[in-house]
Image: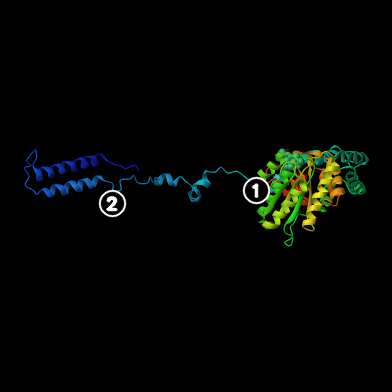
Amino acid sequence: MNYRFHKHDYIIFLLSYVFFYIYIEKAQGVFIDIPVDAPAWLFLLIAVVLNLWAIPLPGIHPRTPPAIEAKPSELEQIPAEETKRLPEEKAKPAVAVPSSKERLAKGLSKTHKGFIDRIADVFRRHAAIDANVLSELEETLVGTDIGIRTAYKIFEDIRKESTAIDSADKAMTLIRTEIERILKSREQPLSIPEAVKPFVIMVTGVNGSGKTTTIAKIARHFKNAGKSVIIASGDTFRAAAIEQLEHWANLVEADFVKSQEGADPSAVAFDGLEAALSRGHDVLIIDTAGRLHTRENLMEELKKTSRVLDKKLPGAPHEILLVLDATIGQNAIEQTRQFNSSLGITGLVLTKLDGSAKGGVIVGIANEFEIPIRYIGIGEGMDDLQTFAAGDFVSALFAENEA
Ligand SMILES: Nc1nc2c(ncn2[C@@H]2O[C@H](COP(=O)(O)OP(=O)(O)OP(=O)(O)O)[C@@H](O)[C@H]2O)c(=O)[nH]1
Ligand SMILES: [Mg+2]
């Protein structure tokens, strides 16, 4: 503690010892004879009082510096509302957190350029909607990532209405309505019935599509919704895959069932289900390998895992998610076909929309398969997974953004 002494305090302190000395001489008379006619105890009393003056006494004589108070003139310079704020709040720079819609629009900005802008360009180049425009539109639509079938479906709608279309705006509105109609039919968020416990989700997809990252994001999503989650590392193909998943499970504070490299994936899924049942978890998410020697091998392994789960808990897995990488464009349509015919996919996740100009493929997939699109990935971060909402998606897709 820092005590505050003034010069006179030191003098009084020294003086107290002078009086002590006088008291001793008065009482004992060792060296000098004090020529003052007063009793010795009086000198002792004065010595004690002076000494006490110099000693810090809490409450009576604290000797600590008083709190520094701002001068009234300084206070007046601070606006009233600022004085009400907490110091921490004031210290933080004002950083605007983008809303989920803003993040979606930013994530889809590349697809906007590679899909919507290309179509809009056709109308910008021509003053009237005539046969030339229609043939250019047909070519452009076929050249996007929505796939030939969907391209012709949208084109036919425009062609049928072409006599009524007298402006580029009207044409774009018609295209937008058609895209929204297609996507709306696949908007069906993943919901977990109370009666099903644990709700088992098996996550599939080719290697690198984003399965493991998506599992972590979904686990966090359910944890935030108050569900208890357990994750099983069914991708036993690589040790690194198991460690990667364990890391994510720890991060999102989900329970984890670890496997050994090379273990039978269906046995790991079984262990996961047993753990989920005995520990009373609401949701079990099972990671799977995306890479095997052949695609046929992979499908057989996934089918086996699905059978084993069903045997232990009839009806499981309740959701077979297929994770698709949007950057591969139309290949995602073919992947959906293969996985769906082998496994019966019940939900789709389209990842990496933020890094792709080929996100238009989502319209092709929605048009060709009657499979709900559950989530979309718009970044690598834990909060970069959004529940698919067709209206928001189309608004973001058509919004003008910086790529
Ligand atoms: N930009 C972006 N990157 C993503 C997204 N989702 C996943 N990724 C990245 O894609 C890469 C592969 O993701 P993983 O989750 O490991 O993919 P996986 O399907 O589990 O891969 P394997 O286990 O090898 O089959 C990682 O670098 C992820 O960060 C997304 O929505 N946007
Ligand atoms: Mg993985």
Q: Which of 222 and 102 is in front in this view?
A: 222
The image position of residue 385, as x and y in percent, is: 71, 47
Question: What residue appears at the point 84 percent right and 41 percent down from the top-left corner?
Answer: 295
Neighbours of disc 2 within 10 Å: few (<14), some (14-19), many (20+): few
**Residue 268 numbered tag:** none
Query: x%, y% of residue 400?
Result: 75, 42
Q: Does the beta carbon of the residue at mark 1 sit less than 8 Å from ligand 1?
A: no
Residue 63 position in % (x across, y down): 30, 46
Which residue is under mark 2? 60
Is 146 placed above or below 279 here? above
Q: Is residue 328 above or below residue 189?
A: above
In the image: residue 174, left or right of residue 9:
right
Write the residue at 66% across / 53% down.
223
The residue at the far bottom in this view is: 195
Q: Is residue 400 visible?
A: no
Q: Nearer the viewer, residue 25 or 317?
A: 317
Q: Dot 1: what SS? A: loop
> Mark 1: few, some, or many residues within 10 Å (few <14, many ≥20)?
some
Where disc 2 sits, the SS reads loop
The type of residue carrying mark 2 is Ile
Give left or right: position of 117 versus 25.
right
**Quadrant that contains the C terminus:** top right
User: Quick one: label 1 or label 2, which is nearer the N terminus?
Assistant: 2
Q: How far apart are marks 1 and 2 (CA)?
A: 56 Å
| Quadrant of ligand 1 in image | top right
Looking at numbered disc 1 in the image, what kind of residue is underneath it? Val
Read off the residue under disc 1: 252
- The residue sitting at 10% across, 42% down in the picture is 25
